């Protein structure tokens, strides 16, 4: 079966559709943690959900093995068997040279690196957004680089400093990668004021549109009338990131 860790109570139509169309999907009920090593998780609303998923992603991977993917990551092509043979595979994080990404992780259960990362939560700092997920794993990786297979630019791409330009103004750089990190929820755009839906994604003229159309298998031309009223906020931000000529 295909194990999905979360809640059977999800009611989003897309999740319902997945459950209907993927009969091997098994939902493993999970309760969001309140503590780690008896240390209360952050009450900061900006940090709390991220820290809960930090705890869960490493705990579940250590117990079952498999693949963890952030909610704003799209799969572009199957991950090669050679990568899946390693005990732990991840990309470098975009926020610093000495950090290891955790937006996409492929790992064997109870791998040596997962054990070390799990133990690092004993020093959990609720005031630091990325310490548990990227800083501490980066420190461990610097000491034990042989425990990690680094997938350079294969998982976390485009980088944080590049995503606006590459998603909004460029084309077809994404097809050869395993995953694409949108750095935003896929149903919203830059400033979260305007939604991209299945009804207008065919008019989004950029790599972002290519990715979303590929994911939703949409093959439809954009009419002049649709283009004329297309997502004013999206167009504004497309112009913001357009290269000057």
Image (spheres, rainbow, N blue to C red):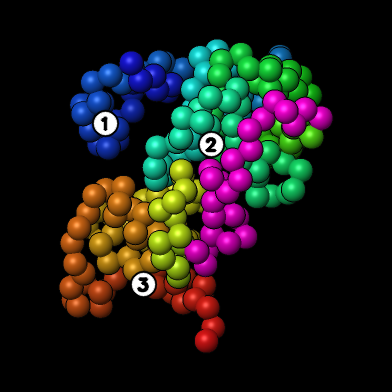
Q: Are marks 2 and 1 in contact (CB under 8 Å)?
A: no
Q: Is residue 159 left or right of residue 169?
A: right
Residue 55 location (% of width, % of height)? 61, 24
Q: Gap in Å between the C-alphas at discs 2 and 3?
A: 32 Å
Q: Nearer the viewer, residue 4 or 98?
A: 98
Q: Is residue 180 left or right of residue 101?
A: left
The residue pinned by badge 1 equals 18
The disc, 2 or 1, on the residue closer to the chain's N-terminal end is 1
The residue pinned by badge 3 equals 232
The disc, 2 or 3, on the residue closer to the chain's N-terminal end is 2
The residue pinned by badge 2 equals 104
Toward the right, the furthest residue is 143
Mark 1, secondary structure of its residue: helix
Residue at 66% across / 26% down in the picture? 41
Q: Is residue 4 left or right of residue 117?
A: left
Q: Gap in Å between the C-alphas at discs 2 and 1?
A: 21 Å
């Amino acid at each position: 079966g295909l194990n999905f860790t979360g809640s059977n109570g999800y009611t989003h139509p897309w999740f319902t559709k997945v459950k209907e169309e993927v009969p091997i999907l098994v939902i493993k009920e999970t309760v969001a943690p309140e503590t780690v090593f008896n240390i209360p998780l952050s009450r900061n609303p900006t940090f709390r959900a991220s820290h809960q998923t930090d705890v869960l992603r490493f705990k579940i991977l250590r117990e079952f093995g498999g693949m963890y993917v952030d909610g704003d990551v799209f799969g572009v092509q199957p991950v090669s068997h050679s990568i899946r043979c390693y005990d732990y595979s991840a990309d470098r994080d975009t926020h610093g040279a000495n950090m290891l990404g955790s937006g996409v992780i492929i790992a064997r259960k109870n791998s040596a690196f997962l054990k070390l990362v799990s133990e690092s939560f004993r020093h959990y700092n609720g005031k630091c957004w990325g310490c548990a997920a990227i800083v501490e794993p980066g420190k461990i990786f610097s000491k034990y680089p042989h425990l990690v297979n680094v997938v350079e630019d294969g998982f976390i791409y485009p980088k944080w400093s590049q995503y606006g330009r590459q998603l909004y103004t460029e084309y077809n750089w994404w097809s050869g990668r395993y995953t694409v990190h949108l750095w935003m929820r896929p149903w919203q755009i830059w400033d979260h004021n305007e939604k991209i839906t299945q009804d207008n994604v065919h008019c989004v003229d950029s790599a972002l549109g290519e990715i979303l159309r590929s994911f939703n298998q949409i093959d439809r031309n954009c009419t002049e009338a649709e283009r004329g009223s297309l997502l004013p906020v999206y167009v504004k931000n497309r112009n913001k990131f357009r290269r000057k000529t």
